[in-house]
Amino acid sequence: MSNKILVCDDEEGIRESLKLILADNHELILTDNGEQCIDALKNNSDIKLVLLDIKMPKVNGLDVLKNIKEIYPDMNVIIVTGYKSVETASEATQLGAAGYIVKPFKSDEILETVKKYVS
Ligand SMILES: [Mg+2]
């Protein structure tokens, strides 16, 4: 069974943190923009979970989420963002996000959440 996780965040520090937390037990694909994120999904049919940032320079994470859900309605997407707002959280949920993690996150939070979707 696949344990592949796709990360999309424009900040290198966040991608590196997630890598430190997850790389021992998961196969990771790291991307830094929405276009790369969608490409990675198209090229890897065994991705089980997407960890998606909201604030990114080119394409906003909510638009990336919309796009993902149009193409892969059943894909698990967790929003990981420093942009703490109830509106964004509920919009993301309405768009089909499975959950929401606010930065700065603790490694336990990431591991607990990921465990629900990836073995
Ligand atoms: Mg960002």
Image: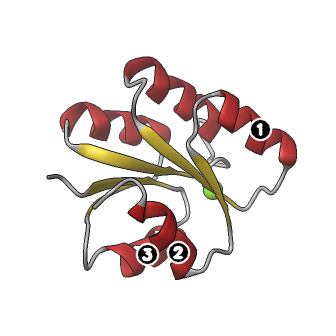
Nearer the observer, 106 or 19: 106
The residue lying at 67 percent from left, 37 percent from top is 92
Helix, strand or loop at label 3? It is helix
Instruction: Identify the residue at image location x=43%, y=23%.
Output: 73
Q: Which mark is residue 13?
A: 2
Q: Nearer the viewer, residue 16 or 119?
A: 119
Q: Counting other residues with Cα less than 10 Å from the Cα at mark 2, is it few (<14), some (14-19), or many (20 or more)?
A: few
Residue 95 point in image, percent of width and height: 63, 28
Q: Residues within 10 Å of mark 1 (few under 14, many from 20)?
A: some
Left or right for 77, reference 27: right
Residue at (62, 48) in percent of width and height? 56
- Say which residue label 3 marks: 16
State which image quarter holds ligand 1: bottom right
The reply to whether callout 3 and callout 2 are in contact (CB within 8 Å) is: yes
Q: Earlier in the sequence, mark 2 or mark 1?
A: 2
The answer as to whether callout 3 falls within 8 Å of ligand 1 is no
Q: Residue 77, image x and y in percent?
A: 49, 43
Colour mode?
A: secondary structure
Q: Is mark 2 within 8 Å of ligand 1?
A: no
